[in-house]
Image (spheres, rainbow, N blue to C red):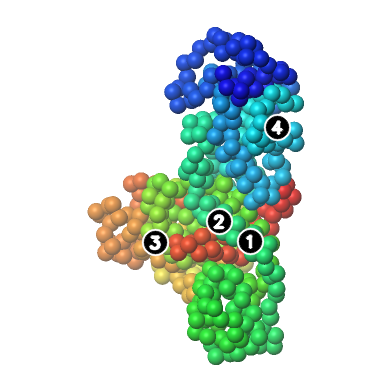
Amino acid sequence: MKNWAIALVCLLFGVASCTQKQSSAFVEIERDTTITEANAFTNLFLDSAQVTQFIDENRLEDSVSLLLRNFYNSRNYQLAWFTEDGVAEQTQAFYNLHLEYINEFKDSSLMFPVQLQAEIEQLLFQDTVITETSLTLADIELQLTQHFFNYVSYAYTGTVDPEILQWHIPRKRIDAMTLLDSLVENNGRNLEEWEPVNNQYRLLKKALLHLYKIEKEVHWEEISLGDAKKAEIGDSTAFVSQMKKKLMLTGDYQVEDTTGRFTPELAEAVKRYQHRMGLNEDGVVGKNVVHQLNIPIKKRIEQLLINMERMRWMPNMTEGNGILVNIPQYELHVFEQGKMVFQMDIVVGKTGSETVVFSDEMQYVVFSPYWNVPPSIVRSEIYPAMKKNPNYLAQKNMEQTGTSNGLPIIRQKPGNTNSLGRVKFIFPNSYNIYLHDTPSKSLFGAEKRAFSHGCIRVQQPAKLAEYLLRESKEWTPDKIAQAMNKNSEKWVTLEKPVPVFITYFTAWIDQEGLLNFREDIYGHDQRMAERLFQRL
């Protein structure tokens, strides 16, 4: 038997020193070895009593205890982190992955216990044969497995409870036991494919590392327009030189020129930066551009960490079709097989009437809809107006259909002035939120589009209707146009419900590979920061 195997036997049973004879007793243990071929990579085993003792001594929670028992029972108590030749490849892979996570997210709560850290480093990095340690190999093995389950819980499903932060999309679920089985089976290789995170998360992680580099190497100075209101092509000032240097760091200006002259090339770089910040893309630098450029790198890093936490919560959309609305972006995206096929501008809820973050399934398209006015709007707007003007309902193409709790029940008839426009898209939910057309088309020209009472207004309703009904021969574009211009309501049930995700991301990588940031319009980032960074 190799020296490593002798040492491992000693560690497994907590013996301070071993001989060749003592180790032979280990391999002669009779046990059922009917385990999967993929897992049969070692003849080293735990005893079920060791697992029970470890659980009892560490007072593990029931959920972790069950994972440990099930994991080792499923592999007939075969070790996962060590072989007869020493530390397994997956142990080194997990160790590296674990350290990367701590360095990237500054999450000290996930650090190995001090003693375990010392033992692992000794096993991984020293060249001499180990014959004794302060922990038995069984302890090291079980602590590593427990720590892996803890790591998966935080690193891949998030550290903050989304429901506390009014995020009502069901949290992604991960089978930690299957994930560990996969890590062992693949010997810790191909980790990027193995990690249960979406591609957007991976891209943000790369952006995070780049911002850490800037933070470490560059002093991020504030810049100012001074007395000027703007800077544009033809200007020549010290401010322009400062701005060029900043846009070089952000990757938007890629010309070796730091003079004070505002060139056409700089205007293109400014447009690119404005695009990434969701600003009007005119190539002119005003207070909004300056404000964005002056946001400290530390704050941008925190913004990425906040949004990566949300990415951990999200189910994977790489397969299947769906609609994703991103509130701070004021955009709707339609996906097929995980790829975006088109997008459109939207209007979302204003402060005090925020659009809720949740997910559901779209089931109906309603042409020429009635607008059933919510009681809150009747109470605050409609009823007071009715008292002042007896003709108010007729003037607004509305009618009263009854009373409830002392308030009139009001609906607006189909027509050009209907607040829902000519079509609405229903995914039944308790928040009474849906997508719809609007007669107020001018609102889509605004840079910031938070104007509604909570529902989501879409810029191209006919295009969305045509897409949703594309597999129905009956609903041609002409018939859809006719239905949208009648004075009678028409409900159409979709043949297949379409998943809808109403999300809130203030940082992401777009289709062009560019890092985007947006304003925290509802304060969700701020509330997340209070919980996320307090823990870190």
First in sequence: mark 2 vs mark 1: 2
The residue under the point 58% across, 65% down is 518
User: Who is closer to the viewer here, 96 or 273?
Assistant: 96
From the viewer's perspective, is 535 left or right of 183?
Answer: right
Q: Which residue is mark 3?
A: 342
Q: Report the mark closest to the observer, 4 or 1.
A: 4
Per the rendering, the mark at residue 206 is 2
- Percent x, y of residue 434: 48, 55
- Percent x, y of residue 397: 46, 68
**What is the secondary structure assignment of the residue under circle 2?**
helix
The residue under the point 33% across, 46% down is 495
Question: Is the C-beta separation of discs 4 and 2 under 8 Å?
Answer: no
Q: Which residue is mark 4?
A: 119
Neighbourhood count class around disc 3 (C-alpha, 10 Å): few under 14, some 14–19, many 20 upward: few
Dot 4 amino acid type: Glu
**What is the secondary structure assignment of the residue under circle 1?**
helix
Displayed quadrant of residue 423 = bottom left
User: Who is closer to the viewer here, 487 or 485?
Assistant: 485
**What is the secondary structure assignment of the residue under circle 4?**
helix
Neighbourhood count class around disc 1 (C-alpha, 10 Å): few under 14, some 14–19, many 20 upward: few
The residue under the point 59% across, 78% down is 244
Neighbourhood count class around disc 2 (C-alpha, 10 Å): few under 14, some 14–19, many 20 upward: few
Q: Which residue is mark 1?
A: 213
First in sequence: mark 4 vs mark 2: 4
From the viewer's perspective, is 330 left or right of 53?
Answer: left
